[in-house]
Each structure stands twice: as C-alpha cells, then as structure tokens.
Amino acid sequence: MGHHVRISSEDRRQQIIEVATSLFARQGFEGTTTRQIAESAEINEAIIFRHFSTKEELYWAVIEDQCRIRAGREKLEQALASGGDDEHVFMTIAREFLARDATLPRLLLFSALERHELSQRFFKVHVASYYEILGDYIRRRISEGGFREVDPILAARAFFGMLVYHFQVQELFGAKHFYNIGLEDTVKTFVNIWLKGMRP
Amino acid sequence: MGHHVRISSEDRRQQIIEVATSLFARQGFEGTTTRQIAESAEINEAIIFRHFSTKEELYWAVIEDQCRIRAGREKLEQALASGGDDEHVFMTIAREFLARDATLPRLLLFSALERHELSQRFFKVHVASYYEILGDYIRRRISEGGFREVDPILAARAFFGMLVYHFQVQELFGAKHFYNIGLEDTVKTFVNIWLKGMRP
DNA sequence: GTAGAAAGTAAGTAAGTACTTACACATGGG
DNA sequence: CCCATGTGTAAGTACTTACTTACTTTCTAC
C-alpha cells in the first residue's frame, strides 16, 4: 500500500527497544525472533535492522536501556536514608521488592542463563550494587551496635535472598496460583526473621 | 563408513538423555539444537528421532529423568530425621544445598522461564515438595516450643531463599569469580541468622 | 518546486532448523 | 542359511532464521 506513517528515528528506536524488552523477558534471546518483534511492533522487519545491525546489538540495547532505569536502586537508597527504625526501613524495602514487575528479573535470569559471558554489567548494576548498598548500611548498624558481627555482604544476600527467591517461586514458578499469601504478612514474616537474626 | 557400533536401545536412550540434559541445562530448550545433541553424543542425528519422536518429547524425558533423581530430597529428609539439634540439622541441609552441581537448578530455571506452562510437575518435585517437607519439620518444632509462631511455609522459603539465591548469585551470575567466601562460613552465617530469627 | 536525505517496504538470500526417507548392515532364531 | 527385526547412516525435506537488496514514499531546506 505504501501508505506508511513516518516516525522519528529516536522514537522508532525506543519503540523497538520496548517491544523487544517485553519479548526477550518473556521468551529469552534464543526464543524470540526478529520477525516476531517486527509483528509485535507492527513494523516491517527490515526497520529493525536499520536501527540495530544485528539481533545481538538490539539485545544489548535492551540491556543498556534497563541499566539506565535505576528506580529500584534509588528507592533502596531512599529507604535506607529515611532515618526510620530498622523495622520500618526493611519492611519498606521488602514491600517494594515483592511488588515489582517481573520483566527485569526475567531479563536478568535469561541473560545469566543463556548469555553468561556478556551480562556482567547488567548483573553489577541490578544485583551486585544492591547488596553493596545494603551491605554499607548493615556495616554501619553493626558499628553502632544495632546488629551483631556478621559479614555485611552475606547478611545482605540473606535478606535479598528471602525476597528474591519468594518472588521467583510466586511469579516465575507460578506458586501464587496455589499458595497465595498476603503481601503484608509475607513482608512482616521475612523482616522479622531477618531482623531478629541480626540483633546482638 | 558403515562400520557402526551397535548399542542396546535402552543404553542409547539413556545416553541421549544424558547428553541432552547437559546441553539443555547450559543453553535452554530454544538454545539447543538436535544436531548439537547428536554431535555431542557422537551419533547420527536421526538416531535421536528413533528414540524420541520430537525434540519436545526428548525435553520431557530429560525432565522426567531429573524427577526420578530424588537424592536431594532424601538427604533433606535424612537430615531432618537425624535427631540432632537444630543447628546441626540446618547446617547439614545448607551445606548440602550450596555444594550442589548447577545442572538441576539451571534446568529448573530454564523450564520456568521458557516452558512455563508445562513444567509444573518438575517444579513440584524439586521445589514445592522441599519446603513442604521442611515446613512439616518447622511446624513440629513450633508445637514443641523450639521455634516461635511463624507460617511454616514462609519460614521454609526464607531459609531456602537465602541458600538458593546465594547459589544463583555465585554460580549463575558468576559472583564467585570476584567474591568467594568459604562454604563453611557462609553456611554458619545463614543458619545463625535464620535460627536466631526463629527462636521464641 | 525540487533535490536530497531519511524512513519505509516487498521480496529476496543463504544458512540453519526439526524432522524424514530410503537404504545398508548386523544379529539371533527357525 | 536366511529372513525378520533392530540399529545404523547419508542425504534429503519443508520451513524458519537473521539479515539484505533494490526500490518507493515522505519530509525538510532552499
């Protein structure tokens, strides 16, 4: 028909990244085809290759894009700086973590599983930095006498571990369909176990 | 050259399953080709289709095979029935969990991510049943007054969460290459946090 | 109004995919 | 001995994949 809508290069690029993000998150890199991305974005497949020279490059643009989104990290820093008591701080973090959208966790897992060698930066921005930040807070609380002497990185991992694993089981393995407990009870249970476990 | 080695159907089938297991675990279902499986097993590709009518069927044979391997579950039940004190019991479980081979966890994650709808049984055998068993033990310890009143399933998830997430970070995300802490220290830290958190 | 760049498209290509076919060879029982 | 059955293979099939090509349409600047 030839009657196509012209859209600016930047907008088009962003649109492709967004569509690709959702598909890569649901099906992984290998499980997603460029044709599928084109159909989903309702554009001609060739347009993808005008903006990204390979599927691989598009994939890294998606990762790069997700690395820019640091909302979670900011919320973490914000919660830690709020000055509330430990219970309030950690419940805020836990609540935020468990209420998340599954897109980023899925992308992270896929990239770790199928693109091992290249996803270091992605991992560092979205995983490692998290428990470095929380580790710093724990270190301070230890020196203040609020927590007992524990490796701060391991303690942070223990905390995130409870949350991340629960999230995985509920969202990825579909456990929420046969065991759905309220968010607030879950948060309270995890934070209580961890905080009691950290007290001197 | 036509000089081929004849092998019994059962052995061949098992050989194919073993090779496929390792490839599916490393690259996922979509990322693994039947040609690659054949090359890896050093057999003609057609042999695969004599034993399994589709790649999908081979995949489910792999899952089925992994479901039969219940060594982990037995060790869990064994540790819980050993009659030692809580610290000994949970350290034994933790040690066993963290020293595992990554094949099964990787298969589980891939199946959850890319074959969501079909991997329920796999999940139930290797994930859900684990914290049902541990949940029962926790329930008993609560009634004995050894642990405080906590949802046993959530408490079990909290415990496994610390272990599984740590394992994922170390093995899948490759954190062990830049942060490698000793197994025994890790085990002790996690078990201490959780046990202290569960005490009345 | 028109040149030229940018954005769009239909219709490819070569290589790969899961899977099949037709046929060769081995083995054990009658 | 030879035939039925089971195990092996080379060389396919039809389809899909990532990626290209040659070409058209639209927008902007002068």
Image: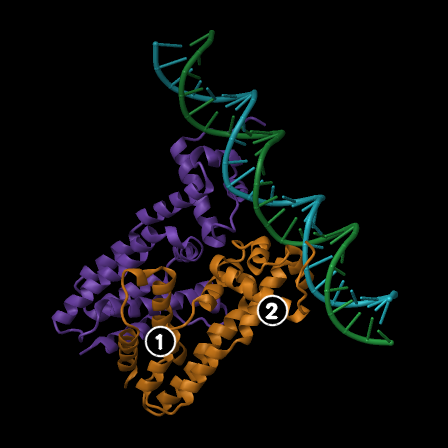
Chain colours: A orange, B purple, C cyan, D green
Give the percent coordinates (x, y) of residue B50: 45, 32
Residue positioned 51% across, 73% down in the render: A124
Whether residue B5 is visible: no
Q: Quadrant of residue A187?
A: bottom left
Location of residue A108 with respect to C11 vertically, above or below:
below
Residue positioned 38% across, 67% down in the render: B165
Label 2 element class: helix
Chain name for mark 1: A
Q: Residue A159 has which mark?
A: 1
**C-alpha distance separating marks 1 and 2:** 35 Å
Location of residue B2 with respect to A108 vertically, above or below:
above
Residue positioned 51% across, 53% down in the render: A31
Location of residue A105 with respect to C18 vertically, above or below:
below
Under mark 2, the amino acid is: Gln
Under mark 1, the amino acid is: Phe
Crowdedness of circle 2 by 10 Å Cα count: few (<14), some, many (20+)? some
Crowdedness of circle 1 by 10 Å Cα count: few (<14), some, many (20+)? many
Front-most of A64 and A150?
Answer: A64
Q: What residue is pinned by disc 2?
A: A14
Q: Residue B86 has which mark?
A: none
Determine whether, in the image, residue A120 is placed left or right of residue B198: right
- Disc tally is 2
